Amino acid sequence: MPKALMTATHFVMSYQQDTALGDITFSPEACASMTHWTAPGVAGAPVGFSDNLISTNGTLQTREASIPRSNGAYFLRIKITQP
């Protein structure tokens, strides 16, 4: 289950991903209006929006998606897809 927190400078969502589940994709996304979601590094994504690997324990990764608070109000979600 993702966990949200706010630091002095960022909105952060922590989540875990099991890399043994190779056919499932986890992608953090941000949106200001709930209509146009973007992933980090994609054209139109908020400045400074990132997804970082924090730790690995076996096949379980702990990751953090973060966005600077200076960007204003944003929604964050984890999009999970399976082909």
Image (cartoon, helix red, strand yellow):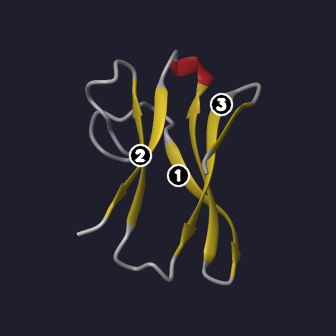
**First along the sequence among labels 1 and 2:** 2
User: Residue 10: which disc?
Assistant: 3
- Position in image of residue 30 (x %, y %): 42, 34
**In this rendering, position of residue 10 left or right of residue 23:** right
**First along the sequence among labels 1 and 3:** 3
For residue 45, what is the image quadrant?
A: top left
Mark 1, Cα crowd under 10 Å, few <14 / some 14-19 / many 20+, is many
Q: Is there a contact, CB below 8 Å, between mark 3 and mark 2?
A: no
Q: What element carries label 1?
A: strand
- Position in image of residue 79 (x %, y %): 38, 49
Label 1: which residue?
51
Q: Farthest right residue?
A: 8
Q: Relative to residue 47, is residue 25 depicted above or below?
A: below
Q: What residue type is labelled 1?
A: Asp
- Position in image of residue 21 (x %, y %): 45, 78
Q: Which amino acid does label 2 sit on?
A: Pro
Q: Which amino acid does label 3 sit on?
A: His
Q: Is there a contact, CB below 8 Å, between mark 1 and mark 3?
A: no
Q: Distance between the residues labelled 3 and 2?
A: 15 Å
Q: How far apart are marks 1 and 2 (CA)?
A: 7 Å
Q: Is there a contact, CB below 8 Å, between mark 1 and mark 2?
A: yes
Q: State the residue at coordinates (61%, 51%).
A: 1
Image quadrant holding the C terminus, namely: bottom left
Q: Distance between the residues labelled 1 and 3?
A: 12 Å
Q: Is mark 3 on a helix, strand or loop?
A: strand
- Position in image of residue 56 (x %, y %): 68, 74
Q: State the residue at coordinates (52%, 15%).
A: 72
Q: Farthest left residue?
A: 83
Q: Relative to residue 75, is residue 52 depicted above or below?
A: below
Q: Is mark 2 on a helix, strand or loop?
A: loop
Label 2: which residue?
40
